[in-house]
Amino acid sequence: MDNMTRILREVFTGVRVIRAFNREKYENDRFAKSAGEYCDVSVRTGKIFAILLPTLTLLTNLGIVIILWSGGTEASSGAIEIGEIFALIEYLTIILFTGIMAILVYIEFLCRRVLKI
């Protein structure tokens, strides 16, 4: 996105020079190339995010179900208290948000590697 903005800024500030030297097609091609790269990276990162986020959410929800199931049986027998069950669920939720942040960092590194920033 930064590259596209930079190209547009250059075109807007140098529009008279571009017209004087008949470089409209070159500038259009340059912007189209930049927009195409941005589109490719956005689609690629969107696909990765679309796969990783639901998977992580599914695993977390399955973990919550397992905690509630096993915790409910343990709480009914008096082995643990209900507060401990909710603490485990909170810990699992914290892990979910940490995983989401890790996915976002991975996507950021992927964008930087693809764009060679």
Image (cartoon, grey):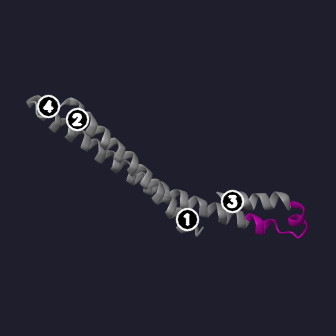
Which residue type does callout 4 highlight?
Ala
Q: Are marks 2 and 4 in contact (CB under 8 Å)?
A: yes
> Which residue is under mark 2?
85
Please report the residue visible at 53 percent of the width from the left and 62 percent of the height from the top: 111
How many numbered badges does the structure rendering display?
A: 4
Closer to the eye: label 4 or 1: 4
Image position of 1 (left or right of 45): right
Q: Main secondary structure of the magenta part?
A: helix
Q: Is residue 35 above or below residue 21?
A: above
> Which residue is under mark 1?
112
Q: Which residues are magenta?
A: 15-28
Instruction: Judge by depth and name the residue closer to the eye, 16 or 28.
Output: 16
Q: Quadrant of the N terminus?
A: bottom right
| Residue 27 covered by magenta stretch | yes
The spot of residue 100 in percent (x, y) is 41, 49
Q: Earlier in the sequence, mark 1 or mark 2?
A: 2
The spot of residue 19 in percent (x, y) is 88, 64
Q: Earlier in the sequence, mark 2 or mark 3?
A: 3
The spot of residue 46 in percent (x, y) is 48, 54
Closer to the eye: label 4 or 3: 4
Name, please, the residue furthest toward the left.
77
Residue 4 circle label = 3
Q: Quadrant of the C terminus?
A: bottom right
- How far separated are the C-alphas under marks 4 and 3? 58 Å
Q: Secondary structure at mark 2?
A: helix
